[in-house]
Image (cartoon, grey):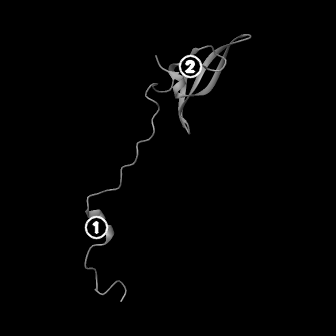
């Protein structure tokens, strides 16, 4: 006889026992968030040591993305060019950006 010696079910199934235990599936993890140091996109920020700039330059944070090395911010900033200011847009590690 398939299923053992006893006819019918003598106890609840494993699924029924799990449902009755009161223990549910683990909660879904929270989605990753941008670094708390800088707020939402479209905000002023300072860019430390950008290519073509001296020291720290003002910039506009456009968006965030999570990269394999951590969070990165897409920033627009201006650098001096031969005929005036040149607008640059680049991705920077979150550690290079600061809100004041």
Classify the position of the N terminus by image quarter.
bottom left
The location of residue 93, given as percent across then percent down, is 55, 29
Residue 43 lies left or right of residue 88; in this view the side is: left
Q: Who is closer to the viewer here, 33 or 43?
A: 33
Secondary structure of residue under mark 2: strand
The location of residue 97, given as percent across then percent down, is 52, 23
Q: Who is closer to the viewer here, 46 or 85?
A: 46
Q: Residue drawn at (54%, 29%), measured in percent from left and top? A: 63
Q: Residues within 10 Å of mark 1 (few under 14, many from 20)?
A: few
Residue 87 lies left or right of residue 39; in this view the side is: right
Q: Residue drawn at (40%, 45%), measured in percent from left and top? A: 29
Residue 75 to residue 79: above or below:
below
What is the number of the mark on residue 48? 2
The location of residue 12, given as percent across then percent down, is 27, 73
Quick one: which residue is furthest to the right in this view? 82
What is the number of the mark on residue 26? none
For the residues carrying marks 1 and 2, which lies nearer the camera in this image?
A: 2
The location of residue 76, given as percent across then percent down, is 60, 22
Q: Which residue is mark 1?
A: 17
């Amino acid at each position: 006889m398939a299923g053992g010696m006893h006819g019918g079910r003598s106890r609840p199934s494993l699924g029924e026992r799990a449902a009755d235990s009161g223990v549910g599936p683990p909660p879904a993890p929270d989605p990753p968030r941008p670094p708390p140091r800088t707020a939402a996109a479209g905000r002023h920020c300072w860019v430390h040591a950008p290519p073509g700039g001296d020291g720290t330059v003002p910039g506009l944070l456009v968006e965030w993305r999570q990269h394999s090395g951590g969070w990165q911010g897409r920033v627009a900033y201006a650098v001096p060019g031969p005929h005036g200011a040149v607008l640059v847009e680049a991705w920077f590690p979150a550690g290079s950006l600061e809100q004041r």
